[in-house]
Image (cartoon, rainbow, N blue to C red):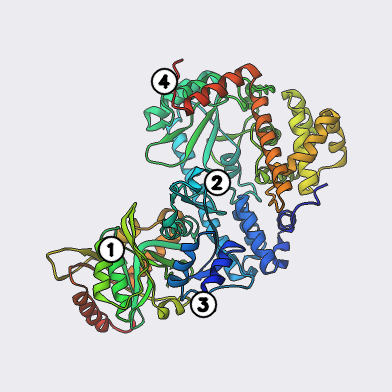
Amino acid sequence: MYTSHSSALSSLILSLSDISYVLSLKNVELDDWLHLAKQSGLLATLGYRLKEAGLLSAVPEKARRTILGVMHFSDYLSQMAQWEVNRLQRTLKDVNDIVLLKGAAYIAQKIPGLQGRYLSDVDILVPEEQVNQVEHHLLQAGWESHKPASGYDDYYYRQWMHEIPPLRHRFRSVDVDLHHRILPRTSRLKPDPDLLLSAAQPCLKAGIKVLSAEDQFLHSCIHLFYDSELKNRLRDLVDLDVLFRFFSKKDENFNQKLLERAHQLGVQRPLYYGLTFTKTILKTPIPDEVFLSVQQYKPNIFINFIMSKWLPLALLPIECNSYLSSINRQISIWGFYMRSHWLRMPPFLLTKHLITKTWMRLGGNVYK
Amino acid sequence: MRFSDLSLSTIHHALRTKGVVYQCGPFTIQLKANIPSLAAQIHNLFAHYPFINNDVLINFRVNLVRPHTHRYWWRPQVQFKTAEGDPGMAPFPLDHALPMLEWGTNWCIASQSHFYLMLHSAVVEYLGKGVLLPAWPGSGKSTLCAAFAMRGWRMLSDEFGLIDLETGLIQPLPKLIPLKNQSIEVIRNFAPDAVIGPLFTKTRKGDVAHFRPPLASVAQSDIQAKPRLVIFPKYQPDTRFKLIEVTKAQALLRLANNAFNYQVVGKKGFQAVKSLIDQSSCYELYFNDLDTVIENLQQLIKSLPSEE
């Protein structure tokens, strides 16, 4: 199905399942691989996999230096994120357990295969009734919001979104996203945040909780397929691949729990997409019986056709070498961008929001 | 093969089609641009850079493009695009393509070369002894660097003190030196045979003209230098020459705080600066006359023990 893409993309995908493949790349192939891996935000992750396998020193010198450079940068980001978590812990020690989501949670669990993953913010989940209290504590301790308190963006976040406007400490560079659910209030899907919170578990890091294994996987599916623009998101698919391998190795009942939990949270469709695309694109070893049992959550034949044909085009870092293929990719990116908004909000609200944003961009004032 | 071995039309053709690939220090840069005036400037100023026409690993892919809007025709502009990210540079006037290229590539280097500790410093070498001249913009380090280069010192860089985190040595990066405002005249008078590009007026840093690094410096740009001297220069109109010793502890802090990526490289960066300072004598320099500086520093370097 995905045979039409470039050789650089094939190399990148092959190296994701077998890191030693990198050593077989010569000159231009290696250059193209390096370039695409970097553009996809996967080079540091692949660098760590090379290092783990003891292969980094076998990579040609110039490539090795480039890889080490991005690894240093990702180490820095990871350290900044961990420091932010440490500061959050100190500030919120009397208020609440800290439940980490996504990247910061993967770092806290030291998930092998995801070391070197880029992250620019720390996402935490708190019960909705505690959002104000937590926000108050953070503001007291030096965090600030980027959005003016009475502006439209602030209103928009608080009224419709799953998080409040990003907070950043005035002396640091990492955003803290304070979530009270994992999808916008107005979203078509409504996984119950209380279920997620009550299943949250301690991790390697004392005083820190993360979502249960199933919930982490489902959240990652939801985030990718229901809450993103899907443009160049191969690295999100890699998250899913690694999480699946990691959790199913750790717990033999993971697959079963995953299906049950998807049903309980009402997020079967994102799970279907997550398993389908990791299996078809990254060859994730998803057992046949699991794959078969999610087939019932497939969308109708028309949507399924569109998703399977156009989604990889938007999601994968495809370099278009003809005008026609470039147009085709642009359309798919635009289409999925529209879809992400469509899934986020009912049409009336979406229209109102887009008109307001356009008006603001033209320099108009918005009084709510 | 160097750019000086090529004809202007070859360069222009390559710029317009598959791009020219040039080597500047450790970096291989691919440049595409359909701007005739730029081809001539590159032909002159990049003359000593190796021109690469086989398949090699490319660090930065740069594209200078003209916007397809009314700004293609009316008060035409140029934009800096690179596959490595978005430097967030506003468009420049079309005839300022060269300054845009130089500043844009600085961004590429500073934002993605974390294999090195990047000090904000000029670097030169005399008698095999590396001299770092760390300073904020406006202290005269570019002027000094060009002046040293014209008196037979090896020029390593006017802006980036790249410390190799594995060897602890200084990696040359002989980029063009953007001389600013009065410095342009100063260097023209100091060394009439210096090759200096066209004057670009009213850039964001005032008037700028680019100094071409000498062939000898470019040709040795894969030889790393051993740091021996750290000098914090400051142009001071009423001081002919004054050298004040700086304690190592203070020099370390000043050097580290002036780096582009000290936080990013973390512990390795600290170790690199520490060993650099351990091997170096450190001074503050106040000056208003280039010849005096060069004479005195040559004496100082000759007096340094050959190996500590």
- For the residues labelled 3 and 2, say whether their Cβ atoms are less than 8 Å apart: no
Q: Residue at x 67, y 49 (%)?
A: A317
Along the horizontal axis of the image, is B81 left or right of B144?
Answer: right
Q: Amino acid at mark 3?
A: Arg
Which numbered tag is attached to residue B2?
3
Q: Nearer the viewer, residue A139 or B302?
A: B302
For the residues marked 3 and 1, what is the alpha-carbon distance in whole angstroms?
39 Å
The answer to whether one can see residue A253 in this image is: no
Nearer the camera: disc 4 or disc 2:
2
Q: Determine the chain carrying the residue at label 2.
A: B
The residue identified by callout 1 is: B251
On screen, residue A157 versus residue A315, left or right, reads: left
Query: From what the image shows, is residue B12 above or below residue A287?
Result: below
Q: As shown in the figure, which amino acid type bears the numbered disc 4?
A: Ser
What's the CA distance linking mark 3 and mark 2?
33 Å
Pointer 3 and pointer 1 on the same chain: yes
Is A307 drawn above or below residue A365 in the view shown?
A: below
